Image: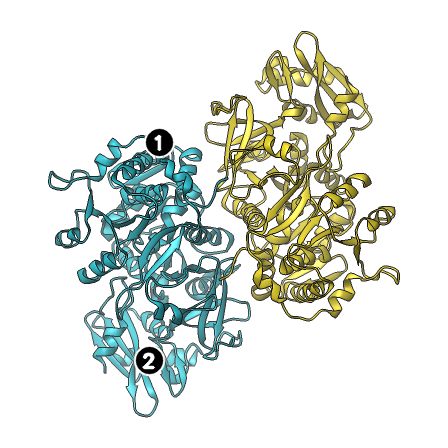
Chain colours: A cyan, B yellow
């Protein structure tokens, strides 16, 4: 009997799509040759003593080696901890300690960070073409010296075995660890591909697409690409470390048709070229402003929004069934359809569903077959977020009569003015449409009368001032896009906005600075 | 936590696609109202004593009631035995006995068969609008009297619980029973929808399609439609008992865009109208002759072939990536792509893989996450078919260099001439292209010199004779479509060919008559 194990997707790709290319920077492999390298690596791993349940931290950019490790560690039953190298060094070391990593697979291209992290583990494998004499064992030697023979241990792994551990990138406190089994990870990741194929989205995905993941593998495994690409048999391009200009070049050179990225990456990609860039993009992680959506559309990018997170995997996708033109663009930028088998409810503070009227705000509760049990060694946070088989997302949302959902804000970032929710993201979206606005955040500031009031912090060119923003917001009120009391009382113009390691605007920092 | 349980698909549809229509003959429901009826029914079932593990036989045409039972029985944890009413009465009674059915849900429209079957079980529920005084309890009363409250027992059901039992329709010996769990049935059935969405087929399927299942629910649950339709939120039209003319009328009236049927049903549908019939059709169960494929194409039907069976569920779909015109038609009629997560190998008698050269015949071995454990109380047949986690399909196939597969024949129907396989289906396909040929079967007849030789049995109009068939086959040899030694030695012309209960040509009967 075969079961839902991560490496089965690569085994199938090697059999069914043997000669389909897997490109990593300068080198072109195939699913056939990558599978052989992976099996050889797995054989060497067993001889190092890496086996079922061994904790293995990996810190690398999106390379073919990282892709191979996703499957080789699965094959020997080890647990992959995908280390977020954008955390602070202290937090990185803390996550390695909390995950109890016994081995580190470490790319030596992180400069001083490499030297800081290496001593955190008893055993290090160096990931590079030529690691140097003091950096052994090195990855390529393990591949070269392994036998092309699937380890016996592969037959003992169950879908309910833990496959991976990774960490949230919360803006307050320590990162929170989450564990997923093979079954949870595969069913969740593959449902992204199914939802994209079944819904009318801007980022539909089939085996004919050429996929380049720009979401780092440490973020929920690059939103599942290491499993989705072989599952579909789709050609895969791994960008390794690359800037926006190089990414544009990779897209043109390898005829990439599908990519994923957060809005900030999309913005930088569009800054890097003024030419059309025909590409299907799955984006998410933070709201897509309508200004950026329109710019992407002008340059020929079709997009869809994914909704999810480290503690729930993917749950919904933006869809625009039958819509065209600006209506389609708006729907794809905001209207979420739950994945099949995912239940999403918008609930008030007493946990009762709010009316599906597209207006009443509430917290988004989620139920899916791949929800984790809770956070790693953190019963308090687990009890708060995982309640009776549901995940409380902490997101503020509305539900429409047709069952679609719009996420408005993080509850902790939302503003409560006179007892009413103000969705900062809606205000941000309207301000972002103004030409010359680079980025904007709307945050809560304390107010004696109303409790809280909104404040806009804007990074913009010299042509944008408070009057112009005020005019745009008043027009939005006239058009019915905004409630009048949502207009921020205070506007501050800054050079740039502070970002988190996940590429999101750091609202906590902004809020603290405004108190 | 939510898990893969059959009735979750209907619960989700009622929540997410509440007002989407479910049409059953004269009545139009919605997923919302059907779900309410289903919950009320489930509540009544518990009061009848039907609970987790209770065996329940159902004998009905494809009605909304049968659809509801698929989910109500899931909700109380009972096991549904979908009774094949096309078996002989003796075999029907035998399957009811072997499955240990405690309850029968029986439509009273089967005439004398109803009266024969009813006494086989201690408890009968009558399925009809008005069952009459001597036929109680009746289904509609159970629905009317149940409370709209999901039974508590629903919370105790596990994905590894058995969900259904049904029987193969073998041409020799007793039918063989197979059991599937919720997890197996759902993951297998839903993968049909995923494969159709991910591959370039002629029968792609999304939530925008209007689905009418013409495969009876007793055949592998109508190839999964009772689960697929709510999973996609697609409008559903249930044909109940209807002939080809009525089916054409239902298609036009409800703007049906997607259906499934065996080739014989497709043939009859096309006979019933000479007008174009724009429709996506998933067909399978027996080979689609190229003659029928061309006729379907002329009338505007797009089709795809599904490969599978009662003892493996669905495993592959015909796809024609990037092909157009006649090439596309040929590929969709014969070239199978395994579903994602399905492994298909073509093996020789020593169980070694044959070359993937598109020519070497071997037996098709299958591995998938939803394979059953074996046949019900039939260790001999189980041991022969289920070997080391693989299912030996008993089908003769070739594998092409691109990994696609063509199934040529059942091994037991194939002909071995001078030690070489002869694929009767290829010969049948060529003969079927001749205008005036209604149906054709090529079978093995004993031969002193070669062991076996092929014989063609042909039902055709008066314009077709042995000379014309001989010419067509010789032309096919010249075109490289046929090996010369495959040309049948004997041709017999008949009025019509004998059929099995599954609508397949009964080759066993033909072979026995020719010995």
Residue A252 in view (yes/no): yes
Residue A301 in view (yes/no): no
| Pointer 2 local density, CA inside 10 Å: few below 14, some 14–19, many at least 20 | few
Q: Is residue A228 above or below residue A504?
A: above
Whichever of callouts 2 and 1 sits on the residue coming sooner in the sequence is 1
In the picture as drawn, the residue positioned furthest to the bottom comes out as A449
Q: Residue A354: x percent and y percent?
A: 51, 77
Q: Is residue A46 above or below residue A200?
A: above
Q: Residue B377: x percent and y percent?
A: 66, 39
Q: Please state the chain letter of the residue tagged with numbered disc 1 in the rendered image.
A: A
Q: Nearer the viewer, mark 2 or mark 1?
A: 1
Check the picture and name the quadrant holding the C terminus of chain A: bottom left
Q: Which residue is mark 2?
A: A471
Q: Please state if A502 lies on the left or on the right of A426 as rendered.
A: left
Q: Tell me which corner region of the image, top left, top right, bottom left or bottom right, holds residue A514.
A: bottom left
Picture disc at residue A172: none
In-front residue for pair A100/A240: A100
Q: Is there CB contact under 8 Å for labels 2 and 1?
A: no
Q: CA distance from mark 2 to mark 1?
A: 68 Å
In-front residue for pair A230/A385: A385
Q: Please state if A204 lies on the left or on the right of B97 as rendered.
A: left
Q: Please state the chain letter of the residue tagged with numbered disc 2 in the rendered image.
A: A
Q: Are marks 2 and 1 on the same chain?
A: yes
| Pointer 1 local density, CA inside 10 Å: few below 14, some 14–19, many at least 20 | few
The residue at 79%/21% (across/down) is: B513
In-front residue for pair A370/A362: A370
Q: Tell me which corner region of the image, top left, top right, bottom left or bottom right, holds residue B427.
A: top right
Q: Residue A295: x percent and y percent?
A: 34, 61
Q: Which residue is mark 1?
A: A149
Instruction: Give SS at disc 1.
Output: loop
């Amino acid at each position: 009997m075969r079961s839902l194990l991560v490496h089965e997707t690569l085994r199938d790709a090697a059999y069914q799509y043997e000669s389909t290319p897997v490109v990593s920077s300068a080198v072109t492999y195939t699913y056939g040759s990558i599978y052989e390298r992976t099996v050889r690596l797995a054989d060497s791993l067993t001889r190092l003593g890496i086996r079922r349940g061994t904790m293995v931290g990996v810190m690398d950019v999106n390379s073919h080696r990282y892709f191979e490790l996703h499957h080789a560690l699965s094959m020997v039953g080890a647990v992959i901890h995908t280390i977020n190298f954008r955390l602070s060094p202290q937090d990185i070391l803390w996550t390695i300690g909390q995950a109890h990593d016994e081995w580190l697979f470490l790319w030596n291209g992180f400069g001083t960070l490499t030297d800081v992290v290496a001593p955190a583990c008893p055993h290090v494998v160096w990931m590079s073409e030529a690691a140097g004499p003091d950096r052994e064992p090195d990855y390529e030697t393990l591949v070269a010296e392994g036998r092309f023979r699937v380890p016996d241990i592969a037959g003992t792994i169950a879908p309910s075995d833990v496959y991976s551990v990774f960490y949230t990138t919360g803006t307050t406190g320590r990162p929170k660890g989450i564990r997923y089994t093979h079954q949870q990870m595969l069913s969740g990741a593959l449902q992204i591909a199914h939802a994209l194929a079944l819904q009318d989205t801007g980022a539909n995905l089939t085996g004919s697409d050429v996929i380049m993941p720009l979401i780092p593998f440490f973020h929920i495994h690059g939103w599942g690409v290491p499993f989705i690409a072989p599952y579909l048999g789709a050609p895969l391009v791994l960008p390794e470390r690359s800037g926006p200009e190089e990414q544009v070049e990779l897209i043109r050179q390898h005829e990439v048709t599908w990519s994923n990225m957060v809005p900030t990456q999309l913005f930088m990609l569009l800054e890097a070229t003024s030419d059309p860039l025909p590409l299907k993009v799955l984006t998410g992680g933070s709201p897509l402003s309508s200004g950026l959506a329109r710019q992407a559309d002008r340059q020929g990018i079709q997009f869809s929004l994914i909704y999810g997170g480290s503690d729930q995997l993917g749950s919904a996708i933006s869809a625009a069934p039958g819509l065209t033109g600006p209506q389609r663009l708006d729907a794809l930028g905001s209207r979420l359809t739950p994945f099949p088998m995912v239940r999403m409810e918008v609930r008030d503070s007493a946990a009762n569903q709010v009316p599906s009227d597209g207006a009443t705000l509430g917290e988004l509760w989620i139920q899916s077959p791949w929800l984790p049990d809770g956070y790693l060694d953190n019963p308090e946070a687990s009890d708060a977020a995982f309640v009776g088989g549901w995940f409380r997302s902490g997101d503020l949302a509305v539900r429409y009569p047709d069952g679609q959902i719009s996420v408005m804000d993080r509850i902790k970032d939302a503003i409560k003015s006179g007892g009413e929710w103000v969705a900062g993201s809606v205000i941000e979206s309207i301000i972002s449409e103004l030409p010359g606005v680079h980025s904007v955040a709307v945050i809560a500031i304390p107010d004696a009368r109303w409790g809280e009031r909104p404040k806009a912090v804007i990074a913009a060119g010299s042509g944008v001032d408070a009057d112009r923003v005020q005019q745009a917001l008043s027009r939005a009120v006239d058009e019915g896009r905004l409630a009048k009391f949502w207009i921020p009382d205070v506007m501050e113009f800054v050079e740039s906005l502070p970002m988190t390691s996940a590429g999101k605007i750091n609202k906590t920092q902004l809020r603290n600075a405004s108190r």
